[in-house]
Amino acid sequence: MARYDAKASEKRWQEAWDRAGVFRAPNESPKPKAYVLEFFPYPSGRIHIGHTRNYTMGDVIARFRRAQGFNVLHPMGWDAFGLPAENAAREKGVHPREWTYENIRVMREQLKLMGLAIDWSREFATCDPAYYAHQQHLFLDFLKLGFVYRAEADVNWDPVEHTVLANEQVIDGLGWRSGAPVERRKLAQWFFKITAFSDDLLEALDHLPRWPEKVRLMQKNWIGRSEGLRFNFVLKGSPKNFPKVEVFSTRPDTLFGASFIALSPGHALSEELAKKNPKLAEFVAECRRVGTAEEAIEKAEKLGFDTGIKAVHPFDAKWELPVYVANFVLMAYGTGAIFGCPAHDQRDLDFARKYDLPVVPVVIPEGTDPRTVKIGNEAYLGPGRLANSRFLDGMEVEAAKAETAKRIEQTGQGQRTVNYRLRDWLVSRQRYWGCPIPIIHCVSCGMVPVPERDLPVKLPDDVRFDQPGNPLDHHPTWKNVACPKCGKPARRETDTFDTFIDSSWYFARFCDSGAMEPINAKAANYWLPVDQYIGGVEHAILHLLYARFFTRMLRRAGYVALDEPFAGLFTQGMVCHEVYRDREGRYLAPDEVEKRDGKVFQRGSKTEVRIEASEKMSKSKKNVVPPEVIADQYGADTIRWFMLSDTPPERDVEWTQTGAEGCWRFVQRVYRLVTEASELPPVGTKIGSTDGVALALRRATHRAIAAVTEDLEALRFNRAVARIYELTNEISGVGQAPGPIPGAVMREALESLVLLIGPMMPHLAETCWERLGHAQMLAHEAWPKWDKALVRADTITIAVQVNGKRRGEIEIAAEAGEDKVREQALALETVQRALGGKPPRRVIVVPGRIVNVVA
């Protein structure tokens, strides 16, 4: 029995593809273009089986499009800057550059093992000076256009590490590494003016039909457009330079339910009052220790400090509200001040209960007596009509909003406005391993851009990581430089860029990664937008939003001719695996355990292991499987086939050894079908007329081609796999059929099977294609076409209903006319019984689908 040698085959074909430059993409071609891209990988060490899923899916699409006659760009690079490399330097004493490039080398080998159809000639890493030189150039372009500015901003400050922490690095108010209480500090930071594009970024989401609805909704919520009212409360007892406070509210209809005013700890009035009130100053300092993460602020206990100031209600000069400084009010949203309506906002209700403030319901459910409504521990957030609201009583919510806004505007106290949750993008990071910001600070000249002739501003190699803070601040010489304008001693900017910048334009650089300018406009306008972008939903908001914004800046700077970088987006599910722990609770890797008699033991021992629920593969829980181990045992095509089989690609899939073994058996089955096929005629032999089993096999072949094509177009990889299984069964079943099958029919079926698995199991497909007598590599072959006549069914099944209730079905010739369909439907015994011997009043025939009989 013939046996497929995956290891030898995969090595051979990968070398053949490389030698022939099969996957190099020219920047000019008469063919239609297809740009396929997976999310930029971070070189964190070694990839595991879970990482191969999205690369496999992208590779299937790239190979499929290539076979369809497209000029395909499918590149690969490395999102190589970031904190993990700096942490490795501190913990292991290895330079970030060495750590990063060694990881890239390892991961490149692992990805090449998978046989991906990648144009490696376009490869780059974002930590290459040749890449970040162009990024610095773009920054200076954007600075000239007014899209960049520097301002003070609240940041999470670790007082032990002497560095700014991202929100996700603040855990329960503590620095993730130092364990020190995090402080909120104001530091001068660099910003990109993303808010200038808020409306455009939001509106354009409705014109991305090939994006998942959930991703578009996540972005809409993040941008957070809200219509509301900005208006003033006159203050009593406040400093003279603060005669009033401006608030923003999306619910001005609840103004008669107001019981307090709350200021952000960062509000100018809060800071002014804290200068003369030590207790308030301590309260503000305590608020700052929570950090800047919105989620952390939301989860914290709602606390306030009564300033003693009173705010006058805009519709009643005798009605005064207490003014608090509150820890839950965000300075970054609206005006940094709110009025609290506890009955209809849970956060406000929690605050009011703590400080014994009035809770007055003003929106009452329909049909409810306002006098009977009591608010308990939950605010009422539903619809209704206004009550306890004077001139608004009886109005529905939207009408009450409009009436309140009209009266406020008429009295000159405020105006209707649109507000966004989206804030400008803070791009400064106090780290070494990132792209240097090309700015020089001069006492005489201020902020001076680094001249283009001096780009790139390179990172120094001789840095130390043995003390807290940013190594660039501690470097003895790198930061000291002459001012380009006046020549006096000056200081380099020591902040580096947020790494999201690196991944916000890499797709455009791939269009011509060797260009002398940041982006080759001609190549970018040919390749962009990316036709199919594939990656995890965890990047659905920030990366995708920043890339969309960055593309808009690139267009304004004249580099590209479009606003939206990704025409099609697909977010794949995660790959999961069981989690194992020993008696002490330590995690164990799959290769450290073995299964015996239905139980799991530590390998080579009798010590039983605890099995926990299957979770996303994670190095921290050691439930990862290296792809090279599986490839060595079963071949890369087995991994690829597993990733595409059974589970819809947008859902999570569980990696199992038995599943891998099943895929390996199928690999061998396909190989045997091809190698054991007997007496096949020469390549290109025409097929004569067929009937019986031969015709049935031809129909199955052409239906499989049509179905797999349709499924791959829709990214339904698991369904495409199921169709291939069906065709394989049809081919295998021919051996049990009476009489011989024409060799040309069998050749057509086998060749079609091999072409269909080509994008999914390319090494196996190349070997089988060669065994079928073809001299040209399958990678150069066109996608198979189907014959419509063979795909069309001879008969169809049509459901029959009587008065909307299903009574049966009929099988009828596909070509049958409406009269024949009606006749057969009425002849059904179940229909006759339902009619009770009476003629139908009406018979409605929906061609090819259903017959509705009205009795």
Image: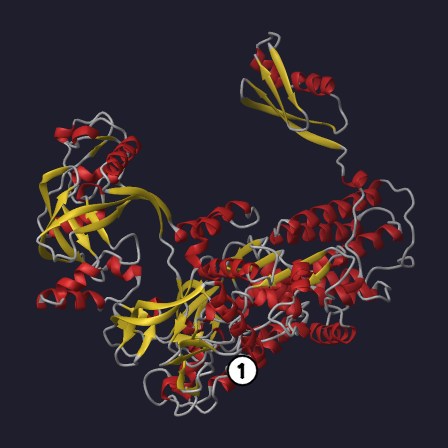
Q: Which residue is mark 1?
A: 454
Q: Amino acid at mark 1?
A: Asp
Percent of width and height locating residue 398: 31, 33
Residue 652: tell me if it is visible: yes
Q: Is residue 497 above or below residue 571?
A: below
Percent of width and height locating residue 434: 46, 77
Could you say which quadrant of the image residue 639 lies in?
A: bottom right
Percent of width and height locating residue 574: 49, 61
Q: Is residue 591 above or below residue 662?
A: below
Query: Looking at the image, which residue is at 42% across and 91% down?
Result: 477
Which quadrant of the figure contains the C terminus? top right
Query: Looking at the image, which residue is at 40% across and 85% down?
Result: 490
Query: Looking at the image, which residue is at 71% across and 76% down?
Result: 11
Percent of width and height locating residue 272: 16, 63
Could you say which quadrant of the image residue 551 lies in?
A: bottom right
Query: Looking at the image, which residue is at 39% across and 60% down?
Result: 424
Colour scheme employed for the rendering of this structure: secondary structure
Please tell me how crowded label 1 is: few (under 14), some (14-19), or many (20+) other residues with Cα within 10 Å: few
Q: Is residue 178 left or right of residue 432?
A: left
Residue 609: tell me if it is visible: no
Could you say which quadrant of the image residue 368 lies in?
A: top left
Which element carries disc 1, helix, strand or loop?
Answer: helix
Q: Is residue 550 above or below residue 344?
A: below
In depth, the one of 503 and 55 nearer the eye is 503
Count of picture labels: 1
Q: Is residue 342 left or right of residue 166?
A: left
